[in-house]
Amino acid sequence: MRDENAPVVIGIARGGVLVAQPVAHALNAPFDVCVIRKVGHPAQPELALGAVSAVGDLVITEHARDIELASLDALILQAQGRARQLELDLRGDRGPIDLRGKNVIIIDDGIATSATMLCAIETARVRGAQRVVCAVPVAPADFLERLRAKADRLVVLLPSHEWRFAVGRHYVDFSEVSDEEVRAALAGERGPS
């Protein structure tokens, strides 16, 4: 990723921020957060119906087709409310880095369903990013083509062919990242905008 011209590094909250922080530092790049919340299935909260950003960018998965429209709308509004609150908690009064005309590297701690990363790509594009690179340590191989179609470049260290893929299996410690850890990372590595 060192060949990306003057990038802005974006970590997807929460876990992606801690993975993105050392990348931003190594690239001497501005560093920011993107808050995306999963729209979980009512019967299986871990199954993503889609994902929504704090500003309302939305990606819907094939799992949403079986959900009544009114229920889906309610779930989307709940997830967007959670995303807005989390963004406010993490950013405080600092606004996002301007992405217009910039090369953006979006990093997460891993991809499970691809909905979160696809929504982050959409958010970067809406904010005017010139080029979008997605980078993750691990992802299921069957979602990579979908991501390649939306990103200008995709970097996956360990594409997995596991039948029952789980991001956490690829970490020694996959503890939940706290808001305090994210705020500290952002405060210490914000960089120029």
Image: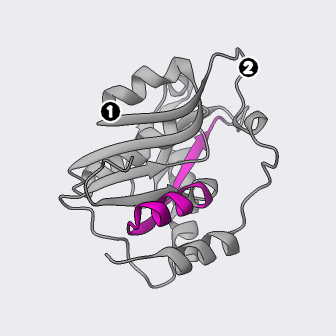
- For image coordinates 56% across by 51% down, the residue present is 37
Q: Name the amino acid type tagged 1.
A: Lys
Q: Name the amino acid type tagged 2.
A: Arg
Colouring method of the image: one colour
Q: Residue 124 at what x, y percent from top left?
A: 32, 52
Q: Is residue 169 magenta?
A: no
User: Gap between marks 2 and 1, in whole Å?
Assistant: 24 Å
**Classed neighbour count for the residue bearing mark 2: other residues with Cα under 10 Å, few (<14), some (14–19), many (≥20):** few
- For image coordinates 50% across by 36% down, the residue present is 115
Q: Magenta span covers which residues?
A: 18-41
Q: Secondary structure at mark 2?
A: loop
Q: Residue 180 at what x, y percent from top left?
A: 69, 75
Residue receiving disc 1: 150
The answer to which image quadrant residue 160 occupies is: top right
Q: Secondary structure at mark 1?
A: helix
- For image coordinates 51% across by 47% down, the residue present is 76
- Most extreme residue toward the bottom is 93
The answer to which image quadrant residue 190 occupies is: bottom left
Residue receiving disc 2: 164
Q: Is residue 32 magenta?
A: yes
Residue 59 versus residue 27 in the image, above or below: above
Q: Residue 148 at what x, y percent from top left?
A: 36, 27
**Classed neighbour count for the residue bearing mark 1: other residues with Cα under 10 Å, few (<14), some (14–19), many (≥20):** some
